[in-house]
Image (cartoon, rainbow, N blue to C red):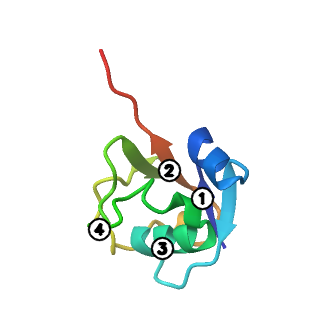
Amino acid sequence: MIRVALPYHLSNLAKVGREVAIEVDSPVTQRKVLDALEAAHPTLRGTIRDQATQRRRPFIRFFGCGQDLSHEAADDPLPEFIATGIEPFWVVGAMAGG
């Protein structure tokens, strides 16, 4: 099981807790995690990544194991602690401003 931590606005939209557990086949990648998350919670489609391009939306970031994973390739394997469910894969709404 992969643990995905969601920001309040997305957990509220999906009517789930701040963290959800989903099944993902190996190798665990960002694409597979997001595919499984959207399949389990269809109201999240288009909120984290663009439905046409599958690219991460602006102001959404991905973190895990103390690393910013936002600019990693979607099909690169995620760190082992995320893949085994020890650490969550964090979806974070970024802020802008000065």
Q: Quadrant of residue 78?
A: bottom left
Locate residue 59, reporting x and y percent. 36, 40
Residue 62, above or below 83: above
Q: Amino acid at mark 4?
A: Ala
Earlier sequence position, callout 2 versus callout 1: 1
Q: Which mark is residue 4?
A: 1
Q: What residue is at 26 percent from the left and 67 percent from the top?
A: 53
* Disc 2 residue crowd, few under 14, some 14–19, many 20+, Cα 10 Å: many
Q: What's the distance in space between the residues labelled 2 and 1, CA to CA?
A: 7 Å
Label 4 belongs to which residue?
A: 52
Kindly check if marks 2 and 1 are in contact, taking CB atoms under 8 A apart as contact: yes
Kindly check if marks 2 and 3 are in contact, taking CB atoms under 8 A apart as contact: no
Q: Quadrant of residue 4?
A: bottom right
**Helix, strand or loop at disc 3?**
helix
Label 3 belongs to which residue?
A: 35
Q: What residue is at 31 percent from the left and 45 percent from the top?
A: 58
Which of the two marks, 4 or 1, is nearer to us in this view? 4
Is 36 displayed left or right of 69 in the figure?
A: right
Please identify the quadrant where the N terminus is shown: bottom right
* Disc 4 residue crowd, few under 14, some 14–19, many 20+, Cα 10 Å: few
**Helix, strand or loop at disc 2?**
strand
Please identify the quadrant where the C terminus is shown: top left
**Helix, strand or loop at disc 1?**
strand
Label 2 belongs to which residue?
A: 91
Earlier sequence position, callout 2 versus callout 4: 4
Q: What's the distance in space between the residues labelled 2 and 3, CA to CA?
A: 14 Å
Q: What's the distance in space between the residues labelled 2 and 4, CA to CA?
A: 20 Å
Q: What residue is at 50 percent from the left and 50 percent from the top?
A: 91
Earlier sequence position, callout 3 versus callout 4: 3
Earlier sequence position, callout 4 versus callout 1: 1
Locate residue 25, reporting x and y percent. 54, 85
